[in-house]
Amino acid sequence: MRLRSGVFASACLLVQALGVGLFLRGFFPVPVRSLPRSGALSGPPAEPPPTGFSSNWTKVPSPLFKKAVIVLIDALRDDFVFGSKGKRFMPYTTQLVERGTSHSFVAEAKPPTVTMPRIKALTTGSIPGFIDVIMNLNSPALLEDNLIQQAKAAGKRIIFYGDDTWVRLFPKQFAEYDGTTSFFVSDYTEVDDNVTRHLDNVMKREDWDLLILHYLGLDHIGHLSGPHSPLIGPKLSEMDNIIKKIHTSLLSKEEGEVASPHLLVVCGDHGMSETGSHGGSSEGEVRTPLLFISSAFDRSGGLLKPPELVQQTDLAVTLAIGLGLPISRNSVGQLLLPVVEQKTVREQLRYLHLNGFQLSRLLQENMATYEKDPGFQQFKMAEKSHGSWIKLYLEGNTSEVLRNLGKKVLKQYLEAIRVLSSSLSKQVAQYDTYSMIVGTVIILEVLVLLLLSTAKALSSRAELEVPLSPLCSLLFYLTCLMLCAVHVVVCTSTESSCYFCSISWLTALGVIMLISGLLCVILSALEKVFVNPKQMAKNPAAATSSWSEFDVLILAGTVGHVSSLGASSFIEEEHQTWYFLVSTLCLALCQETCRHYFLAKDCDLQLPSSVKANPEEVKGAHHHHRDDAGFLQDAPKTGKAANSESTRGSEKWMVLATPWVVLVCCRLLRSLNQTGVQWAHKPDFGHWLTSSEHKAELSLVASVSLVMIFILVQRRCSLVSKIAMALGLLGVYSYRAAIGNVEFPWQRDSKDISKGIIEARFVYVFVLGIVFTGTKDLLKSQVLSTDAKTKFIGLWEIYSGLVLLAALLLRPHNLPVLVFCLLIQAMMTKYVWKPLEYDAAQVTIMHYWFGQAFFFFQGNSNSIASVDVSAGFVGLDNYVEIPAIFLTGFATYSGPLLWAIHLLCYLSSEVSRNPSAMGHGCFCYALLRSIPVAVYIILVTGLRYHLFIWSVFSPKLLYEGVHVFITAGVCTFFTAMDHNHLRKVQD
């Protein structure tokens, strides 16, 4: 079966996307949980029985606190309470920390630092799976054992107000609740007022045992303007007043009561990075304050010690003990001993024994060799010592021996619990190895098939023969049977859940047939290469191909980047790799231009190295070249002699200057956004612009950038699209002014700030209008077979609509990134790619490199924290899942996407000169995406037990997976646009 290069590449990428999806599902499985228990095993353990005695302490201890209030402030960093901001904006909380009856800790959250996994950690004490970062958008009910479920089962009445993620996680658990959406990040006032308005009423009542308040406003301010925004201070003061109100109310309830005291817990689910986002593993994102405030504690005094660093999972255990509830079965947390230090030694030992027993039982169910674990052995030793202490205690011994032994047992329990918790944190989840293997095999088969097809796919015909005969061979059927047998054996013998085994047998059979078919096709291709080399010699592309210095540079850059993915530091600072490659590319272009105009002979002035190898193709190239470029460059068509004279004149110096201009632009963009990990906290021009003191400068930069965007885009648009573009860009500025990022000269009152919904929807209308106009021209060129100019204009108008959408979604300080993107594209098209006549493959690689560099120029990184969630809610008055996901994805990948669509526009103008340009570009683009994802999946599989697997390698894996899906869509669009070549083949 004969296929075009573009069709073949698109099909390969779609199959590879299937493999990536399978691998991701296996790599991010549901964590292993404790087995359900029944009967006597489900109750708490008794005290370790001493010889000759029996203990009557066999039930869950009585609660230490009568009522508990949990105030969870979303994105509350530790320095917001314990730092200078806390002393300035939270004076009451600071007083409680320094001189009040409280215990203060810094709770460390594990990545991913997003809300839903953190709520799971706070309530279950377990470490959620990394895939929960995806499920965060649509949180299902939490079925595993948790604090809320235990409190409900114990007959406690729970009231909740705040983030509706809790309502979705714990349906039917709250006696009363009022949820607010957590995804509409433009709102930071009403979202908290909806919680506080219930406070006065509920604090007067006595019909509740546990009150949970989840405030979202601070997190939304962080997403909008970062941790140093002037809005942070007033919001912290608001939270301080709420804490004061709750604390004084709880104290008033205790007056005259003999019952247990009340407890107030103040904590955060995660922090925020220096850019205001979260999801990664920087110190600002993982460290949150954890305060226990109660009249039962001794008043703080003396020298103020820095808060102790604990784990966020420790809260669930401590609250369970404090409320007299069983510890969650899946908890890996440790009891915070200062919270119970006012109790007797026997009670403290009882609490620690309960904690250690639960951890040791969880270890037994998740580790076959649990008896050899140091923590388990230490726990058994502590139990024996505990039994000896109880014997002395029951004998009435009150000597120093009893006290010293009690202190020794406490230390033994604490050390054993620490080691057990550490072991469980490493063992609590396991990989779905079978799904990972199946996905990896598909990905590698696609990559090998692309590499074997490169010569024919990049030939002048841009076609290749895909043999179907191997699909009817005996080898195919034997492979299918063998793989089916393996599938049956694995799925019937595995003790753990496997996703690939859970799908229907018909779907699994389809995947098995796909793997077998790809293998047979690869073997057939290898046979032609090695067994029948004479047939390959007949291929003109293979016979005349030669490597230029530029090709060697491209190959070395690709290999170097792929090799760097095996090191965590290179992944964290991947932007440095792409900045280096783009800078090196510019220097190589400088050499090419100088060689072209100064070192080449007169007869070779118009023949660069990339096209000299095929004189017959070059012979007809100049006949079409200026015709195609005429409408692309808005230059009048002139004769060949006049055009050559012009090139040797002023354009010659523009060609020589373009690589240097691009190099300067890239250097300026590097100064705009600090990204990565090592230097992300360093000040940059973007931070300077977004500070409240420089709002006028930001307004000037944004307005100039929008004007430049219009100038660079409008020249190739129709009159209607030009008008729509101008009005749309005006709407972009109006939207940013409406939400307070920039200002109009007449807008000085902050009361004019709104959510900008009307202004954003105004822009959306023009985006859709421009895209619709371009689509109409494309359909006209495809159906009516009009000239290439109509098709190019249609593509360019779609591109212009996407540029307008990017201008709306990008933050105002990032608008210069869009300007430089358009400027570099225009200069490279007019002064480098056209005059030097680079072939489609080389232009595609350059587009890909620049697209990757602009991904990081935007301020993105390989951390989830750099995803601008606020872009997903531009123009929305409530959370709508599909538009929010699309807008967030487009804003994140706007750099690579705009360069890919520009590549499509450029190659469409080259079809008259080179009918195979679109196919070559599509194939190269698919190959460039396939190589790194295949290599990285192999690397991340080998490094799956690396120390930084969840903080560094896993977020990068998600980025790579999403990029594959996006590239598959882009290549499909490439194939649909390659209509001229299809008609030529059919003729």
Image: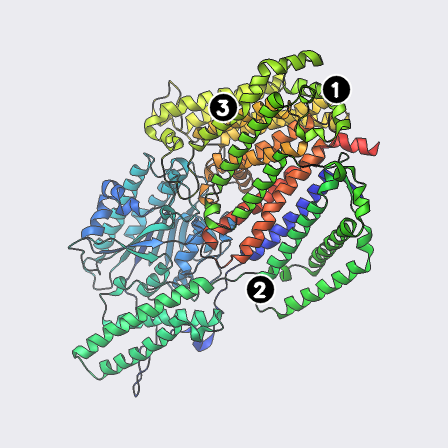
Residue located beneath label 1 in the image: 623
In the rendered view, would you say 397 is above or below 235? Answer: below
**Marks 1 and 3 close (CB-CB < 8 Å):** no
Label 1 vs 3, first from the N-terminus = 1
Q: Is residue 635 above or below residue 681?
A: above
Mark 1 or 3: the one toward you: 1
Task: Give, as a three-letter code, the residue at label 1.
Answer: His
Instruction: For mark 2, give the secondary structure.
Output: loop
Q: Amino acid at mark 2?
A: Ser
Q: Which quadrant of the rendered structure holds the C terminus?
A: top right
Question: Where residue 467 sits: x, y (%)?
Answer: 80, 48
Q: CA distance from mark 1 to mark 3?
A: 44 Å
Q: Is residue 103 left or right of residue 132?
A: left
Q: Is residue 769 left or right of residue 919?
A: left
Q: Nearer the viewer, residue 558 or 851?
A: 558
What residue is shown with label 2?
Answer: 497
Whichever of callouts 2 and 1 sits on the residue coming sooner in the sequence is 2
- In this rendering, does residue 281 appear at all? yes
Query: Is 885 placed above or below 336 here?
Result: above
Label for residue 836?
none
Which residue, given by chain and number where applicable, does mark 3 sit on? 731
